[in-house]
Amino acid sequence: MRILLTGATGYIGRRLLPVLLEDGHEVICCARNATTFDVPEGWEEQVDVFQVDFLKPVDMQEAPGEFDVAFYLIHSLSAAIDDFKSLEEKAATHFNAFVEQTTCQQIIYLTGIVNSEELSSHLESRLRVEQILDSGKVPLTALRAGIIIGSGSASFEIIRDLVEKLPVMIAPRWVSTRCQPIAIRDVIKFLTGVMLKEQYYGKNFDIGAEDILTYKEMLLGYARARGLKRSLYVVPVMTPRLSSYWLYFVTSTTYELAVNLVNSMKIDVICRPNNLAEELGIDPIPYEQAVALAFDKIQQNMVVSSWKDSLVSSSDKASLNRYIEVPEYGCFVDEQKVAITHNTPDQVWQNVVSIGGKRGWYYANWLWKLRGYLDKLVGGIGLRRGRTHPNRIHDGDALDFWRVLIADEDKQRLLLYAEMKLPGEAWLEFRIQHKDGQAYLRQKATFRPFGLFGRLYWGSVLPFHYFVFGNMAKHIERFQAKGQPKVKVS
């Protein structure tokens, strides 16, 4: 079977792709930048990459025209607070116009449960997208899910942050709202299970495990699964705005995502009865077992995808293609060059790609943490996103308050783009280079200021950069992880 996969760089898409490939399907992965899409190793013959931005009409001369099933996994939940509805409608409309000119026989759409009479802006938008997709000529199968439990999912990571960090939680009233969570493994089974089955064309189904839980029960259930003793007290005076700030400052979520989640968390999300699980032979995993499975993946450093790494396909802010070329003019630059003498070049490169997260930034970590706290205070993302894997990195990954633009193993080049709040734009680049038999680590920070305030900002942090960047490069070259054999390079 030939399949079109939108949202291929997203949380669900990255989980679904290897399953489709292992089942022998050919997959066309939609990406906003085809040159940086990471095709799974060993599956190159089964994967085609289609560079497309569904916020714009699709050029059919460049587009694939032959495929059987299309998965629609585009969303804008973390992209904005006010304008995500128009973005989602635009993307769905352009997608519909595209698939109607192909051989596609079925669209499969993963959306949210919308059974309440009063819906949040997010769920209203999800329902509107479903209506747009269903209005086209290609039959739609919509699978409606509530909270998805899996390592790296936004909902699971928020629950994890709250329970792991807070022995005593002062929570808003919405923790009494009921929902019906589902394990990520089961979501993938449902998505693949309905492919090209005509009895499911033109229909929608709610999917979830049997557990109907309040958010309070989910938080305490996570604590039990982790063997943690936690107390939770509900405070009725916490408004949605205060609740959003609570999530934003305590967890790794963005403020936009916190606002949209809180608005949705005020509404019961419970499945309508159906026989889909029975018909597909799926026995949904109970909540606490799903938590345990997710945490096993985290402990084994086997998290396949994370919401933090997703470049949201239906947001203008998500396209980072134009940042890959680092500007040379009108910029401030700090460049360091260190001869590699304490490690091999490959070990230094491994130090480079392991930067951030729990390992930190090799020098003056307290200053990096302070910068993260200041970023949080002004509405930025801070350092709490961390990284998905401790020593592997890919194009598009989130890395603390940076985004990975290029992680080139062969050329040993890492290029990061700053997603913190700045009066300008910033890049941080690392390269391993060789000249006259000597290897060097080159580190380059580039800042393009916005107006006078941007120039004043660079001048104010310049004294810190002098010490931090210079010493960071030296420490990266010298660093030796525990258990790593000491090497002296002559």
Image: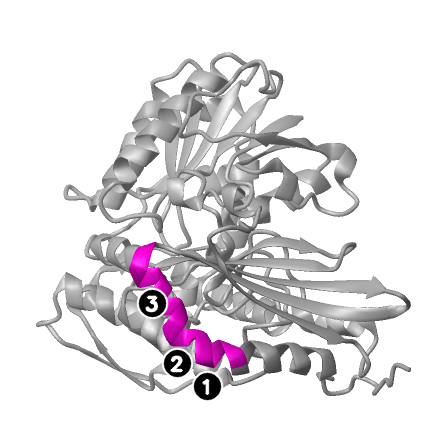
Q: Is residue 219 left or right of residue 41?
A: left
Secondary structure category for the residue under label 1:
helix
Occupied quadrant, residue 458: bottom left
Q: Position of residue 113 (x, y in %)?
A: 31, 44
Q: Which residue is mark 3?
A: 456
Q: Is residue 464 rendered magenta in the image?
A: yes
Q: Amino acid at mark 1?
A: Trp
- Label 1 crowd (10 A; few <14 / some 14-19 / many >=20): few
Q: Which residue is mark 2?
A: 370
Q: Residue furthest left?
A: 237
Q: Earlier in the sequence, mark 1 or mark 3?
A: 1
Q: Quadrant of the C terminus?
A: bottom right
Q: Nearer the viewer, residue 108 or 242?
A: 242
Query: Residue 366, which numbered label?
Result: 1
Residue visible at 60% across and 64% down?
444
Q: Quadrant of the N terminus?
A: top right
Disc 2 vs disc 1: Cβ atoms closer than 8 Å? Answer: yes
Q: CA distance from mark 2 to mark 3?
A: 19 Å
Query: Residue 43, which numbered label?
Result: none
Secondary structure category for the residue under label 3:
helix
Q: Amino acid at mark 3?
A: Leu
Q: Is residue 54 left or right of residue 105?
A: left
- Label 2 crowd (10 A; few <14 / some 14-19 / many >=20): few
The secondary structure that most of the magenta stretch takes on is helix
Q: Position of residue 40 (x, y in %)?
A: 71, 46
Q: Is residue 322 left or right of residue 257?
A: right
Q: Eyeballing the image, is 471 above or below 39?
A: below
Q: Amino acid at mark 2?
A: Leu
Q: Is any part of residue 251 visible from this angle?
A: yes
In the image, the segment drawn in magenta is 451-466
Q: Position of residue 452 (x, y in %)?
A: 30, 59
- Label 3 crowd (10 A; few <14 / some 14-19 / many >=20): few
